[in-house]
Image (spheres, rainbow, N blue to C red):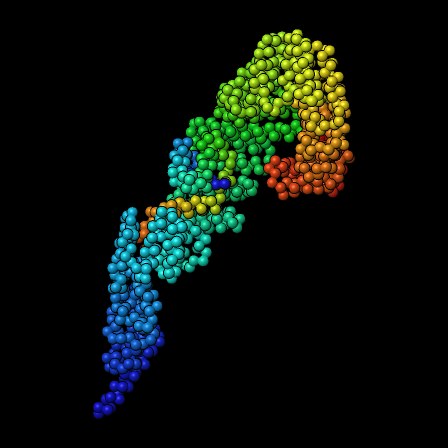
Amino acid sequence: MTNPYAVLELSPGCSEDQIRKAYLEQVRKYPPDRDPERFAKIRDAYDQLRDPVTRIRSQVFSPSSVDSFDDLLHDMQQKGSGTSAKLSIVSVLKLAESL
Amino acid sequence: MSRIRHVERSKSVDVLFQQAQRWYQKQDYKQALKDARILIRQDASPEHRQFLEQVVVARATELVRGNLKDQAQAVLEEILSAPVTFPAAKEQLPDLLLAVGWLERFPQFKPQNDPESHAKFLARGVDAAIVRGQPAPADLLESVELVKQAIARIEAGDEEPLAGLKEIPRSSPLADWRLFLRGFVSHAKNETEEAQSAWERLDPQRVPARMARGLMAQRKPELLKEADYHTRSFVAGLEKLVQGTSTLHVLRMAQAAVARNEWTEALNLVSRQRLMLRAADPEILQRITTIVLSKAIHAGDRDLLRDLTRCSDPLPIDPTWNRAWSLMYEQDEQLSYMEIERSWLNYVRDLGTNSALTDDERKVAQAMVLEHLAEEGLDCYAYQEDEGPDEFEEFADEFRESQEQFRAKIIGYYQQSLKLAGLKSTYKLLSDLYRDEDNQPAVIRTLKEMLQKHPDDQETLVWLSGQLSCAGQSEEALVYARDAFRRKPLDPLVKDNLWKTLRNRVRECIRAQNLPLARTILQEAEQYQPADADPFAAPALDGLLTLREGRVAEAETLFKQAEVAGGGTPPVWLMLIVDSARLHAPPATAKRFVVAWQKSFKPKFNPAVALKTAQMFFNYRTNGIEIPAETSRRVEFYDYLSRGLRAKFDEKDLQALLEMLQNDDRADQDLKQKFLNKAIKSHPENPLIVLMYVNAEIAKGPRKMAKPQTLIRMVEKAGNKIHAGTNVEDKEHLPALSAMLDTLEKLTMMSRFGFDLNEMYERFSGGFR
């Protein structure tokens, strides 16, 4: 099980509106027909967060046993790779001078 | 004279050569070069020429290392005007030419008979030209330019950046760059497979392949395991490029510390890099805090929590760490409810001003904590009820008074919680509390309050109608049952509830002598009768109503119909006996049903009939419906049931029968034990049967119970069977089996340490549970 906030790229304490927007954005990125596994995770995360009572209950009583350093590292790597579209090829070549 | 001069000159040249060689051996190449220049001017012999070449290469290498490329070029110029002949110099020259950016001068030194090394040299030249901006080999200048243009287009975000590279032939040293760039574009679009397929074809020794390995490793850290130092540095550099700093490196180190179970070390690592991590992504620190907090709480590690509070920012939901400490205290069985309660109440106070939540969210959170306090309190209350003094023991009055105060406090927490947010869960928990106390008016009141707040809650509509029915308020019950059905007409449970409520309303109308209304409602009830309802139920009730209407013959026909529908079995007559009393049927009719009931036991024993009858006894008991002359009816039934001890039962039927007997406090204890013995003998691994059997054994006390070791083996066997199987229902019994095993092991230990179990059992008359 993955941290629902991490799946939707949200911070705990975000508003219902932000949750909905983040959900729609993720669904656009990973539509069910293209990535059903990822979509299932997104849907699951959304279901966990959409109901304010469930969301607050998990914030108050569950000390996030669903998260781990492995997940965190994985998510950060994903975020890192997600931004590699912006990774400057010129900067990469500059780094390669040492190779 | 001239001969003498010649001898002297030769002598000085030799001395100079020896002196230059000494400089060379001492690695003073600058001085050696000076002497070698004089030497070659004085005597340009092949030997001196080779020495000059050797010294030039050494000095140029030294200058290149010092990044003095211009001076290195000047030095190299001294030997490039003529063919280089010294083998070691010839070998090192290509690298030097590359290093000083003199690729165009390479052809004059290319090894004629070694095309492979020539190709390698060209490839290195091309890589240096693209990566370091050094001059490209003359014949590849154009292709290098194409690659550079493609790079510029990628940088500018051009949609077709690689279009110009089609002209580069596969055999060209630039082909690797074309592949690399194609892979890079795919990599940037997260098309990992495409990138990998392009990069797999690269020459692994060349710069493009090494860059590709680094880029892949950025996403798949496992690839870094075998990477060399340069690739690792390259990846670290990439991470900095992407995230501004090497966040992943810190996280990896923390992850490794956690893998070694060194959580404090992980925390310290993160703490030292807190500012950097926060700058990279503010969410990281929060997630790390929750991960470490979770570990500390689950492990009951107060030191770790203390370290966490010292070196981490609190979570927005818990700015003063009161929540964290409350959760920690709950793990500690030594702490009293009062201590945990104090901590949670501090958190409730914190929540009142929590800026991370909206006004409504704050109230919901506070309500949840109060509900939680009530639940925890209820557990404590129940435990104290079990452990406290009995009615006539010392301090019984004081204990009762303090328990009453405790109960009032628990109810107070529920009510405060309801006032704040009116959560469904709180209403349900409070109703459960009242139901367990058999406080029906309070249950009904709470459920009605809940429906005011949550009018759509289907479960409550059904539950409330059932409660009202039991309380003899079937008219009002019908309103809720109809409402539930209107909302969910296809839900079989809702339909069943409406049918039952209508039938109860019929009974009430009959009792109130409102027979026309009873008839109308009975007709309405028929349309909701569930498919699995007892087939005799409808004609039986109809018959009693018809009898009250004075149509005796028709009533008799209906009773006959009920008898046929129910196969003349005891359940038909039991229902008629009970309903004839509830509906004030003539005594003669009721008596006739009793006789029929007694006769119905004569045929051969039927397990299904026995189970159904046991169920009816259980249901009447649960719903508080009186059975006329119940003791006699039970004796008659148990007499019949005892015949079943020799009969063959289906496992599920036997299990269900035992459950009925177990839960029915008026059931015959002796017969129940006999059925337990029968069940455990024929199904020794059925978890529910094992649970019931061992529970009954423990309840007997140590004088009469079976040996704990035997019972332990029995429980272990059942547990192993559940673990080996896939039955989900069976798996639900695992916690109960585990708790039972715990009790049995404690008993064994106590006995081993010399405690007299019999004496202890008598002291704690409630048994060991």
Task: Give the image quarter of residue B234.
Answer: bottom left
Which residue lies at the image location 55% right of the left edge and 31% below the top edge?
B341
Q: Is residue B288 above or below residue B145?
A: above
How many numbered markers are drawn? 0
Q: Is residue B574 visible?
A: no
Instruction: Return the residue nearer the eye: B55 or B192.
Output: B192
Which residue lies at the image location 61% right of the left edge and 9% below the top edge?
B515
What x and y, as percent, mark residue B145? Answer: 25, 57
Which residue lies at the image location 70% right of the left edge and 19% below the top edge?
B573
Q: Quarter holding the N terminus of chain B?
A: bottom left
Instruction: Return the residue nearer the eye: B114 or B528.
Output: B528
What x and y, as percent, mark residue B253? Answer: 46, 51
Q: Residue furthest left?
A: B2
Task: Give the image quarter of residue B700.
Answer: top right
Task: Give the image quarter of residue B16.
Answer: bottom left
Q: Quarter holding the C terminus of chain B?
A: top right
Which residue lies at the image location 46% right of the left edge and 30% below the top edge?
A52
What x and y, as percent, mark residue B111? Answer: 31, 72
Image check: A64 left or right of A82?
Answer: right
